[in-house]
Image: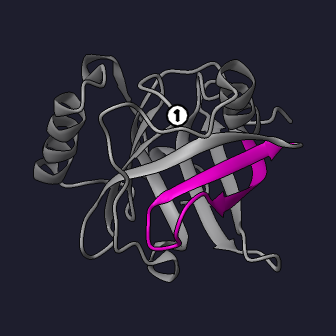
Amino acid sequence: MKTLIGSSLASVALLTGCTGIPEGTQPVTGFELDRYLGQWYEIARLDHSFERGLDCVTATYSLRDDDGVRVINRGYNLQEQEWDEAEGRAYFIDDESVGRLKVSFFGPFYGGYNILELDDDYQSALIAGPNRDYLWILSRTPQMDSATEARLRQRAAELNFPTDELIDVTQGEACPGR
């Protein structure tokens, strides 16, 4: 089985060697990890080789024994009819009330995981890597209402992300086992 997003942030770390945050952006404050844990569905993303061809992508977060966060990223290649899964670990970079973590799927190499937008109910999020090459729109449900998605896309555009390059991720009935 290929390593889905395992190679993703490993690639981010190897290419950028950075747990930074895109210039001119700020992570959310008042962050509560317990409310963030659980499963998130990928609604849209910027294209990268580590997720290319994958739909039905989810990220599931749970606590680790070492005060870190266990990350399970899973996606389905609709063409090859094959699941791809990777497990990683994440740790806060700053204060735990700031939505800024470092994530590793490969040894000691970490990439930035920056929560730039998060609604009050922890139902939608805008996530960036260490630079503007990495962007994800996440939802607690397989479909996101169009107004929320439009708002997150607009916010990403205001932050100078290439939103015209976002890929819509297939979710829902097309995904086996859902």
- Residue at numbered disc 1: 130
Residue 52 vertical position relative to residue 28 in the rendered view, above or below: above
Q: Where residue 169 appears, x then y in whole percent?
A: 42, 36
Q: Position of residue 21 (x, y in %)?
A: 46, 39
Query: Could you say which is closer to the camera, residue 98 or residue 134?
Result: 98
> Which quadrant of the view contains residue 71?
bottom right
Question: Judging from the image, what secondary structure is the residue with disc 1 in?
Answer: loop
- The percent position of residue 115, horizontal first and vertical second, equals 41, 53
| Position of 29 relative to 32 (above/below) | above
- Kindly identify the residue that appears in the image at 75 percent across and 24 percent down: 14
**Label 1: how many Cα within 10 Å (few below 14, some 14–19, many 20+):** many
Q: Amino acid at mark 1?
A: Pro
Q: Residue at x 46, y 22 (%)?
A: 133
Place of residue 1 in the rendered image (x, y in percent of width and height, measured from the top left) = 86, 36
Question: Total number of numbered labels?
Answer: 1
Res. 81 in view:
no
Residue located 70% across and 28% down the image: 17
- Who is closer to the viewer here, 161 or 173? 161
User: Do we see residue 99 in this rendering?
Assistant: yes
At 80% from the left and 36% from the top, the residue drawn is 3
Q: Is residue 91 left or right of residue 57?
A: right
149 lies above or below 59: above
Residue 95 placement, left or right of 109: left
- Residue furthest left as drawn: 147
Instruction: Report the magenta stretch's main SS.
Output: strand
| Residue 68 among those drawn in magenta | no
Q: Give the image's coloring scheme.
A: one colour
Residue 92 drawn in magenta: yes
Q: Residue furthest front?
A: 94
The magenta span reads 84-106
